Amino acid sequence: MTARGVPMTETLLLAVWIGAALLFALVVAPAAFAVLPSRILAGALVGRVLPVIFYAGVVIGSLIVILDLLSRTGGWARTAAGALAALACAVAQLVVGTRIDRLREAIGGPLDALAGDDPRRLSFGKLHAISVGWLGIAMLAAVVALTLAVRASVSRQ
């Protein structure tokens, strides 16, 4: 791959992932909770789509790092931003997501059946907020990497 091809490839990969993550966060998840007949169904839908977003973020962030290291065309900031995006997605899915799954199993039924002050429901809320935070970090890191890839692509033309 040429020196110009790496930033262009990274631009495409990052733009696709950022678009998918934004579509999920701004459209799919809110729509699921707004239109599906139960929060259980909405949660199930979101729970099936979110891992795809996170695993794709791990793969694409890792590809940014690999492409930058192999081609030696990426600056340290672009490589670091790709690594941060991959790491944030990995933590969100493999650490926080695993804890959420274990908590759901321990609850054994619908989250809505728990009292508002039930410690398990409060724990779920905290874990959900942490997951959203990691997704936000991944998206910000991807936007930084995208911006740097676009700038590198434009400056090489």
Image (cartoon, rainbow, N blue to C red):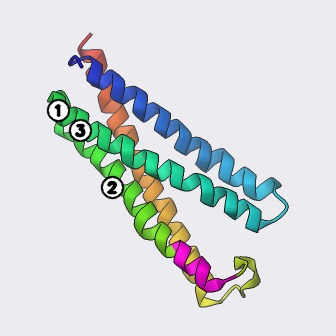
User: Dot 3, how many residues are within 10 Å of its Cα: few (below 14), some (14-19), or many (20+)?
Assistant: some
What is the number of the mark on residue 97? Answer: none
**Place of residue 137 in the rendered image (x, y in percent of width and height, measured from the top left):** 40, 54
The amino acid type, in three-letter code, at marker 2 is: Leu
Point 53% across, 73% down: residue: 100
**Place of residue 68 in the rendered image (x, y in percent of width and height, measured from the top left):** 21, 33
Point 66% across, 89% down: residue: 117
User: Dot 2, how many residues are within 10 Å of its Cα: few (below 14), some (14-19), or many (20+)?
Assistant: many
**Residue extending furthest right?**
37
Q: Was residue 112 drawn as part of the magenta stretch in this picture?
A: no
Task: Give the CA distance from mark 2 to mark 1.
Answer: 20 Å
Residue under label 1: 70
Q: Callout 2: helix, strand or loop?
A: helix
Please tell me whether the stretch drawn in magenta is mainly helix, strand or loop.
helix
Q: Is residue 19 visible?
A: yes
User: Dot 1, how many residues are within 10 Å of its Cα: few (below 14), some (14-19), or many (20+)?
Assistant: few
Task: Give the CA distance from mark 2 to mark 3.
Answer: 14 Å
Q: Are marks 2 and 3 in contact (CB under 8 Å)?
A: no
Q: Callout 1: helix, strand or loop?
A: helix
Which numbered disc, 2 or 3, marks the residue that appears first in the sequence?
3
Region in magenta: 100-108
Residue under label 2: 87
Residue under label 3: 66
**Place of residue 35 in the rendered image (x, y in percent of width and height, measured from the top left):** 82, 54
The amino acid type, in three-letter code, at marker 3 is: Ile
The amino acid type, in three-letter code, at marker 1 is: Leu
Q: Is residue 139 visible?
A: no
Q: Callout 3: helix, strand or loop?
A: helix
Determine which quarter of the picture holds residue 76.
top left
